[in-house]
Amino acid sequence: MKDLNHYFCICNPGLETLAQNELRLLRIQGVPEVGGLAFSGTDRDVVQANLCLRTASRILQRIALFPVAGFDGFEKQCRRIKWGRFLTPSVPIDVRVTCESSRLYHEKAVQERLLHWLNEDCAVRPGEEGESSQRIYVRIVKNRCTISIDTSGDHLHRRGYRLQTAKAPLRENLAAAMVLASGWARNRPPLYDPFCGSGTILIEAALIAKRIVPGLVTERTYAFQSWPDASKYVELVTELREHWKGQIRAESQPLFFGSDRDAGAIQAAQENARRAGLTIEWQQCSFSDVSYLPDSFVLCNPPYGQRIGEDLRNLYAALGGLARSRPDLTIAWLSSDPRWQRATAMAWQKRLGFSNGGLAVQLLRNG
């Protein structure tokens, strides 16, 4: 049997079940924990997870777990770790420390000690501001220390297609979570987003429809590709990318249609879809100006603010009016405040809850 490593999939609170389902499709058993999902697997499994997970933020490899009461014990355990498997002098490091309810409570002191020891043992240096670096995570909770190393590198929501953004863009992994939780992917009917912004929701839906995994959108790199034993990971990335290219659906995709009243947003959406290699129809118009809407599924992230103005009240009233006048439509939307739900004068079912930019939001659906 192949040696198994221990990993942790970080995801936004509320997305654990979706990420767990994604892991299950890769034949990986994820166990929910605070902040994400723990799983055991091979090198191949961690490459698969990085390439394929749509709702994850990043994947860590857990490299040490031990009780700790002071700096002497912490140093002793840290020096036992085979850092040479992960660190190389040419790649700077970024040490991130969290301490809770422990004798070692000074996070900055823990960080400085570990940086000093790693510089002595591995000749590595801390990264400068904005410099690409290998992240190391130290978490000390109730005198138990977990040390993990990042396998992903850049945040996994950064697929590479979104160079143009509109105001308050929704992260790609959150947009994918909306698509998966909405129920649209079950039958994949035509999909419409009347507040499309830079197009993220529709682009993520189109990627799901065509079975294009995130790691195929662009030739991004991962942290494990800069490890001393990078060659085996490079081979796995190449092999698995070829495998997933063979899984792309060749048949014509369902119709995707997005509109927004902002001309800059439509231009950004067009450029982003082009970079992702997708065909999506875009139109500059207000929600109230959409004159014809065929039988379809509406999925959107309407504008919201802390203050209820008349314009927003009318917008949500129009959304509720559409749902009542067109019972043939399935409508799912992201709500940040019960006041918006009341403004629609409709009853909605909660499909998902998560945090978007520090704001608690819910995905609601009619029926």
Image: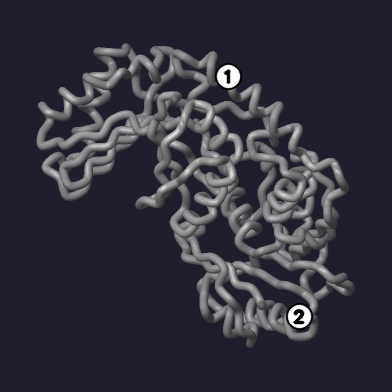
Q: Residue at 39% of width from left, 12% of height from top?
A: 89
Picture quarter with the N terminus: top left
Residue 282 screen position, x and y as percent: 83, 56
Q: Residue at 32% of width from left, 12% of height from top?
A: 123
Q: Is residue 81 left or right of residue 320?
A: left
Residue 286 screen position, x and y as percent: 78, 69
Question: Is residue 73 in sight in this rendering?
Answer: yes
Local packing at callout 1 (Cα closer than 10 Å; few below 14, some 14-19, many 20+) is some
Q: Is residue 172 left or right of residue 254?
A: left
Question: Is residue 274 in sight in this rendering?
Answer: no
Q: Is residue 131 depicted above or below 248 in this figure? A: above
Tell which residue pokes out farthest to the front in this image.
Answer: 1
The amino acid on which the numbered mark 1 sits, given as a three-letter code, is Val
Q: Is residue 227 depicted above or below 318 in this figure? A: above
In the image, 350 versus 339, the foreground residue is: 350
SS at mark 1 in the image = helix
Q: Residue at 53% of width from left, 16% of height from top?
A: 232
Q: Residue at 51% of width from left, 58% of height from top?
A: 356
Whichever of labels 2 and 1 marks the residue nearer the N terminus, that label is 1
Q: Is residue 299 left or right of residue 116?
A: right
Residue 163 screen position, x and y as percent: 67, 40
Residue 26 sits in quarter: top right
Q: Are marks 2 and 1 in contact (CB under 8 Å)?
A: no
Picture quarter with the C terminus: bottom right
Q: Is residue 313 left or right of residue 249?
A: left
Q: Is residue 115 depicted above or below 89 in this figure? A: below
- Nearer the camera: disc 2 or disc 1: 1
Location of mark 1 (residue)? 234
The amino acid on which the numbered mark 2 sits, given as a three-letter code, is Leu
Q: Which mark is residue 322?
A: 2
